[in-house]
Amino acid sequence: MARRRFDCRSISGMLTTAPQTPIKMENFNNFYTLTPKELGRGKFAVVRQCISKSTGQEYAAKFLKKRRRGQDCRAEILHEIAVLELATSCPHVINLHEVYENASEIILILEYAAGGEIFNLCLPELAEMVSENDISRLIKQILEGVYYLHQNNIVHLDLKPQNILLSSVYPLGDIKIVDFGMSRKIGNTCELREIMGTPEYLAPEILNYDPITTATDMWNVGVIAYMLLTHTSPFVGEDNQETYLNISQVNVDYSKETFSSVSQLATDFIQRLLVKNPESRPSAETCLAHSWLQQWDFGGLIHPEETRSSSPPVQDHPVRASEEKAARSCCSGPCGNREDKENIPEDGSMVSKRFRFDDSLPSPHELVSDLLC
């Protein structure tokens, strides 16, 4: 099937249109009160919960440094803003509320997702919390969000359980896709080859330095579905080298033991996505028609959101040893290492692979970005 490729009319796949959201130069602190709750932290960004002084509404304030490694990265932040604006009408992409700017930072005021990351649902300790029906609904919502992005020529390129949030946990709410720092604009004229992402979630074409297409996001949807259904990571190894080998050889455990509680339809859904050849992976639109997603009654295509204020925060749980193998989120370009999140549970003691912005491990290759026309 045809895959749209990166458009050389944009700079390395970045949107160059001016943001429609006014960038306010007023003091952010005059309008919002920061709470002690820190939602995420990286080298170049920090995300904190804040409350509007005028309405009392909760938001997530994402503070992005404009200069990184001595380079001006304002254009890359404006790209992220433009992507969020483009997806405003999609209920499964985090909503951008306001933007502020000061001498050193741009501050994105984002929708607050009280349920935290769906990574928590991947933990064995929570295996009994959600049914396959619940997981199927969440995957369908992820696909709806990905389909919307792909229809608008945007690839996320960092889809993983840590970048999918929940509007609530009790009851189980709806998903919100976040963190568009690695996203790119695609077109029909050029190819972009980049080494970017988190090791255990990298698609084979990233490791092989092959052209990136919409199929790259679909690999990640398969990984997310695998993790939610089996509570294990399909490719993580004892170290990065083993992880990359598992990915390049598509070494996936489909044993009866691992899939003992997974239906045949769900297994088929995963197997169709976790294939090495990007051209063989189904699109988001095709996946939405898969029998696994059609057999459940979701009460409509878009599941109504639960109110956030009544939802308790997700409970923290210990992480298995393999989950401690943190991996650097690395992005090509002068600003590299996009280590920021819109929303992460607040307990600092739980900083692990789910929550940590760790650059201690090398990327599979030296960071490179080539635009090929």
Image (cartoon, rainbow, N blue to C red):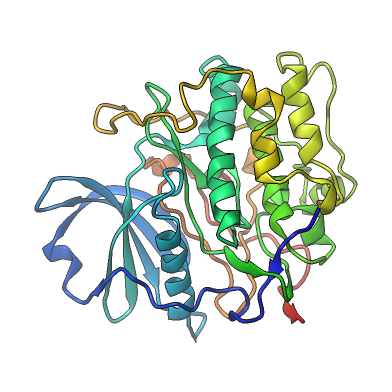
**Towards the viewer: 71 or 273:** 273
What residue is shown at x 80% (from left), y 36% (from top)?
A: 272
Q: Residue furthest left?
A: 54
Q: Where does residue 255 sit, x and y in percent of width and height?
A: 85, 22
Can residue 241 be seen in this snapshot? no
Q: Is residue 319 left or right of residue 225?
A: left
- The residue positioned 73% from the left and 53% from the top of the image is 215
Does 188 sit left or right of 144 as displayed? right
Is residue 285 placed above or below 370 in the rendered structure?
above
Is 95 located above or below residue 132 in the figure? below
In the foreground, 121 or 320: 121
Where in the figure is residue 97, as x and y percent of width and height?
28, 57
Q: Is residue 238 visible?
A: yes
Q: Residue at x 55, y 76 (%)?
A: 335
Q: Is residue 268 left or right of residue 10?
A: right
- Asked if residue 93 is positioned above or below residue 96 in the image, the reply reads above
Location of residue 168 (image quadrant):
top left
Q: Foreground residue, 50 or 223? A: 223
Judge by depth and name the residue closer to the eye, 299 or 73. Answer: 299
**Residue at position x 46%, y 79% from top?**
75
Q: Quadrant of the C terminus?
A: bottom right
Q: Position of residue 118 (x, y in %)?
A: 51, 35
Specify the quadrant of the image occupied by residue 136. Answer: top right
- Give percent across and percent down for residue 345: 40, 40
State left or right for residue 110 relative to residue 284.
left
